[in-house]
Image (spheres, grey):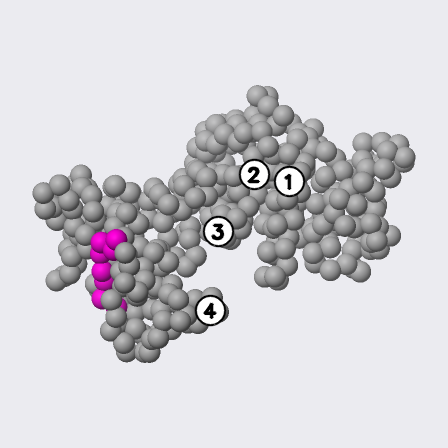
Amino acid sequence: MATVNIQQLQKNYGAIAVLHGIDLAIADGQFVSLVGASGCGKSTLLRMIAGLETVSAGTIELNGKVINTLSPKDRDIAMVFQNYALYPHMTVAQNMGFSLHLRKESPERIDKAVRETAALLGLTPYLERYPKALSGGQRQRVAMGRAIVRQPQVFLFDEPLSNLDAKLRVQMRIEIRTLQRRLGTTAIYVTHDQMEAMTMSDLIVVMNAGRIEQVGAPIEVYDRPVNLFVATFIGSPAMNLIEGALEHEGTLSFVRVGGHRIALGRHIDRLPSTPVVVGIRPEHVTLAALEGATFSLPLGVELIEPTGADSHVYGHSCGAQVMASLSRRDSLALGDQVTLQGRCEQLHVFEKASGMRVD
């Protein structure tokens, strides 16, 4: 069993505050991704959990025990680094077994653990090779193997796939997630790639400027972002944002943008004329007649990007740049004036002043 509980965690470098009172509870066996832009504090948080950075204030608990002052070797936590951190003068087998060697385990115990882990990761043919003779993906597996042989209570991953090409990243994220499920070990994974976070995680922690903006299951964060930052950060392509002002008609609300009105299909509890931002995901609009469509938007086509499965169509609508992810079979040309349709339940409404969700 390995639970991690973080309470009011702060990190300061002199007068500069990097983390501002982080609260986070991670259950046993969960795969949790810390996601955010560069400099948001996610790697600093991971290093504090590992014991590689000191705690300025607050507590980190592992299975209910405060580990703030424990050295990294005493925390029973293993970390996989972005640059692999393999010893170039050691073979794969020696790299994987090094932590057990430091524990003064018997040669028989080390050999058994290394061979079992190598078989798990498909590294058996490479045990006598040196890191320079391995591909990037193989080096990443060795780094993971070195962590696995320790049988830690928690795995920490610090952007482990950022040095790999796109195809190998997809393959490796599947392997990491499958392996974590098989082992049942709690994992905390740092990435700036929201697609990695969405596809791998039980729980996503969205960070911004040293604070947590939202914590939730991937689909929950995608479907109901709590503010504009989360709305624009999670989702690829990014959510479209259109500014306007609220209007009410009976029990329903609308957003007025110039001479156009977007039906929201529900009541927004704000005064009329309140400035708001409507969010529309590119995949939630279509050119075809949509059964149950409750809003429409005019779009002047300015750019078309074929992506294979579909096309990204850019233009302006209601005073904002809008991108629609449409079927590649839709016949479009630059300069076309088209109408996009969608359903009001897929619209997101945020208060412009605070950036917070209001519906």
Residue 121 placement (x, y as % from top left) = 74, 47
Q: Which residue is mark 1?
A: 180
Q: Which residue is mark 2?
A: 31
In the shown orientation, is residue 62 left or right of residue 355?
right
First-in-chain label (3 vs 2): 2
Q: Quadrant of residue 153?
A: top right
- Judged from this view, the residue extending furthest toward the front is 291
Name the residue: 77% across, 58% down: 134
Q: Are marks 3 and 1 in contact (CB under 8 Å)?
A: no
Q: Nearer the viewer, residue 57 or 81?
A: 81
Q: Pointer 4 and pointer 3: residues touching (CB < 8 Å)? A: no
- Does 137 appear in magenta? no
Q: Secondary structure at mark 4?
A: loop
Mark 4 vs mark 3, CA separation in Å: 19 Å
Residue linked to disc 4: 307
Q: Amino acid at mark 2?
A: Phe
Q: Nearer the observer, disc 3 or disc 1? A: 1
Q: What is the magenta range?
A: 292-299
Amino acid tagged 1: Gln
Q: Name the residue tied to disc 3.
A: 194
Sequence-wise first label, 2 or 1: 2
Q: Under tag 2, what secondary structure?
A: strand
Verify CB contact (< 8 Å) between mark 3 and mark 2: no
Residues under numbered marks 2 and 4 in contact, where contact means CB atoms less than 8 Å apart = no
Q: Is residue 316 above or below residue 256?
A: below
Screen quadrant of the C terminus: top left
Mark 4: few/some/many CA within 10 Å (<14, 14-19, 20+): few
Distance CA(mark 2)–CA(mark 1): 8 Å
Name the quadrant containing residue 136. Answer: bottom right
Left or right relative to 289: residue 189: right
Residue 271 at x, y = what percent? 13, 42
Q: Amino acid at mark 4?
A: Thr
